[in-house]
Structure formats: C-alpha cells, structure tokens
Amino acid sequence: MNSYFYLSIAIISEVIATTLLPVTLGFTRILPSLGCAIGYASAFYFLSLATANIPTAVVYAIWCGAGIVLIALIGAIRGDIPNMDTIFGMILIIIGVSLINMNTKAIC
C-alpha cells in the first residue's frame, strides 16, 4: 500500500486518541482509556509503516503538523476558538510541512 495512506491512518488514529484523552479523566474511565490507548498504538504502528518509504523526519513533520491543525480545528468546533496568533502559527505549520513534503522524494 501507499506510504501516504499509512501516514493518513496514523494521523487520524492520533487525532482520535488525542480527542479521547480528556474524556479518560486521567485514565480512570475504562472505555475512553482503551480507545485512547488503541488509537495511539495504531498511530505508531501505521507511522512505522509510513517510514518504510518516506524519510522519518518528513513523516514525523507531516504527522505532527497535521495533528496540531486537526486538533485545533476540533477544539474550535467544540467552542475553543483559537486567537489570531494561534491561527497564524498553524498557517506557518501548514506552509512548513508543505515545503518539506514538496522537496522530498518518497519511494512509494
């Protein structure tokens, strides 16, 4: 399969796990805690598959950048609206990750 597909699954898994994190109440609630653990385990598994054909630094940059932006968007949907500095920072993250991705050759 395509390494970028694996990376997408890793990003989605990490975002789901991070979204569940506050619901675990310090890992005292079993179902959200299990979902969180499975999400992070899945994220790292698929992240490792993505590094087979894409340089690790690039995979990690995309994974982190996409995760930050998606979590911020989910927070905004929930009412935690980011300020202009945060929005500007996320735009810079998107630009940086795009530049890294455009200048890297993957062996997909």
Image: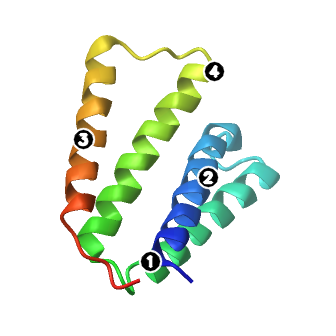
3D distance between C-alphas at marks 2 and 3 = 25 Å
Residue positioned 25% across, 76% down in the render: 105
Q: Give the number of callouts.
A: 4
**Residue to which mark 1 is pinned:** 50
Compared with 103, 105 (above or below) is below
Amino acid type, mark 1: Ala
Are dots 2 and 1 in contact, CB under 8 Å? no
Amino acid type, mark 3: Ile
**Residue to which mark 2 is pinned:** 17
For marks 2 and 3, give the one nearer the viewer.
3
Please indicate whether residue 7 sits to the left or right of residue 89 in the image.
right
3D distance between C-alphas at marks 1 and 4 = 31 Å
Q: Earlier in the sequence, mark 3 or mark 4?
A: 4
Q: How far across and down, in percent of the image, does residue 74 sit? A: 58, 31
For marks 1 and 3, give the one nearer the viewer.
3
3D distance between C-alphas at marks 2 and 1 = 19 Å
Q: Which mark is residue 28?
A: none
Q: Earlier in the sequence, mark 1 or mark 4?
A: 1
3D distance between C-alphas at marks 3 and 4 = 25 Å
Q: How far across and down, in percent of the image, does residue 82 sit? A: 41, 17
Mark 3 neighbour density, 10 Å: few (under 14) some (14–19) many (20 or more): few
Residue positioned 48% across, 67% down in the render: 7
**Residue to which mark 3 is pinned:** 95
